[in-house]
């Protein structure tokens, strides 16, 4: 399709420079847009101005036929709507046909979280006399104690941590930074790991490859998302728990436990680094049982 590659390149620059989106988000946008234009080529439509509402509806039908979830379809349409809005801004088109398309209602995905007794078991697994045990203890204390994303956890540098006031500088999505507090348990676990375990693990690296990442693997290299997932699954195997765990569950657990204990929504939103309150509100459903118990316990007519 004429000029699509040129405009897509300009759109990528717009997302990176003006919107300050992460590389992961930009790649996702590009994938959605390229998928749509591949479909348009199959329909023998080669002019941007020739794309109509009917063509978009046909594309949506194809996505439904391929059994894409409503969430995925909604994301694709949102990406295309943004791209065509950009095309109008650049005077490549006079109007945006995607404005006529309503996004499918998204399914309510209930986040999984750990109960207090479950997470307490994880805190008793690590052998804190050994370097890897010290690292693992510091890792789960940070994940649960701050609610940060796993990708954010992997990027923590030693210089991001201020032990004197108990905060960590987090580099979040879209280059946004925020400070998160760390509690006494995380503070002590990090201190022990930095003083002892990290240096021993880092000692396995060639001096020239030394770095300032907080969390390292058993070879002294920076710990990856995949490495964190492996560590957590290994810890679960060494408990009596039978649940399936993924790193993001610590983030869900952090938010759920805060709300259950009466934290206000805005504070939790800021701690999680959510741009919109609606992203935080998904956690309120898990507090309903807590509210019901409180009502039954305290209301005189319960």
Image (cartoon, rainbow, N blue to C red):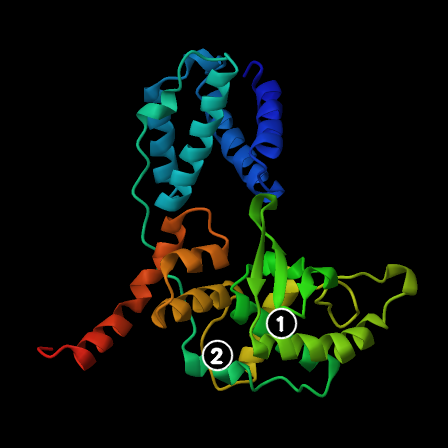
Q: Is residue 111 left or right of residue 150?
A: left
Residue 37 in view (yes/no):
yes
Quarter of the image for residue 132 reads bottom right
Number of residues whose C-alpha sits closer than 10 Å to that of mark 1, classed few (under 14), some (14–19) or many (20 or more): many
> Residue 240 location in percent, x, y?
48, 86
Q: Is residue 14 left or right of residue 70?
A: right
Q: Does the CB distance between marks 2 and 1 fall below 8 Å?
A: no
Residue on which the image places disc 2: 119
Residue ranking furthest to the front: 165
Quarter of the image for residue 235 reads bottom right
Residue 136 in view (yes/no):
no
- Residue shown at 62%/25% (left/top)? 9
Question: Alpha carbon of mark 2 to alpha carbon of mark 1: how far?
Answer: 13 Å
> Residue 296 location in percent, x, y?
17, 78
Q: Nearer the viewer, residue 277 or 54?
A: 277
> Residue 267 location in percent, x, y?
43, 59
Number of residues whose C-alpha sits closer than 10 Å to that of mark 2, classed few (under 14), some (14–19) or many (20 or more): some
- Counting residues from the N terminus, which is met first, the one under dot 2 or under dot 1? 2
- The quarter in which the C terminus is drawn is bottom left
Q: Secondary structure at mark 2?
A: helix
Residue ranking furthest to the right: 207
Q: Say which mark, if any, is on residue 263.
A: none
Residue on which the image places disc 1: 139
Quarter of the image for residue 158 reads bottom right
- Residue shown at 46%/27% (left/top)? 39
Task: Work out whether 240 lies above or below 199.
Answer: below
- Residue shown at 32%/54% (left/top)? 108
Task: Work out whether 294 lies above or below 41.
Answer: below
């Amino acid at each position: 399709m004429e000029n699509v590659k040129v405009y897509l390149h300009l759109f990528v620059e717009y997302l990176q420079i003006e919107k300050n989106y992460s590389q992961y988000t930009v790649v996702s946008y590009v994938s959605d847009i390229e998928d749509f234009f591949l479909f348009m080529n199959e329909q023998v439509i080669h002019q941007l101005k020739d794309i109509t509402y009917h063509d978009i509806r046909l594309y949506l039908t194809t996505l439904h036929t391929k059994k894409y979830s409503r969430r995925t379809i909604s994301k694709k349409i949102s990406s295309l709507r943004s791209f065509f809005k950009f095309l109008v801004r650049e005077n490549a088109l006079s109007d945006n046909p995607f404005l006529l398309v309503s996004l499918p209602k998204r399914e309510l995905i209930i986040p999984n979280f750990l109960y207090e007794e479950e997470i307490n078991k994880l805190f008793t697994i690590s052998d804190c006399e050994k370097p890897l045990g010290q690292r693992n203890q510091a890792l789960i204390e940070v994940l649960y104690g701050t609610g940060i994303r796993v990708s954010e956890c992997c990027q923590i540098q030693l210089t991001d941590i201020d032990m004197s006031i108990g905060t960590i500088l987090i580099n979040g999505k879209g280059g946004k930074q925020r400070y998160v507090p760390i509690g006494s348990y995380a503070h002590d676990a990090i201190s022990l790991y930095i003083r002892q375990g990290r240096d021993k693990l880092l000692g396995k690296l060639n001096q020239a490859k030394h770095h300032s990442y907080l969390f390292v693997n058993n070879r002294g290299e920076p710990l990856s998302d995949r490495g964190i997932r492996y560590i957590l699954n290994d810890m679960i195997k060494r408990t009596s728990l039978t649940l399936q765990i993924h790193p993001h569950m610590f983030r869900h657990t952090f938010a759920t436990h805060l709300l259950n204990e009466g934290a206000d929504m805005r504070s939790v939103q800021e701690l999680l680094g959510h741009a919109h309150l609606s992203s935080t509100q998904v956690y309120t459903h898990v507090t309903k049982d807590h509210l019901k118990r409180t009502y039954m316990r305290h209301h005189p007519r319960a």
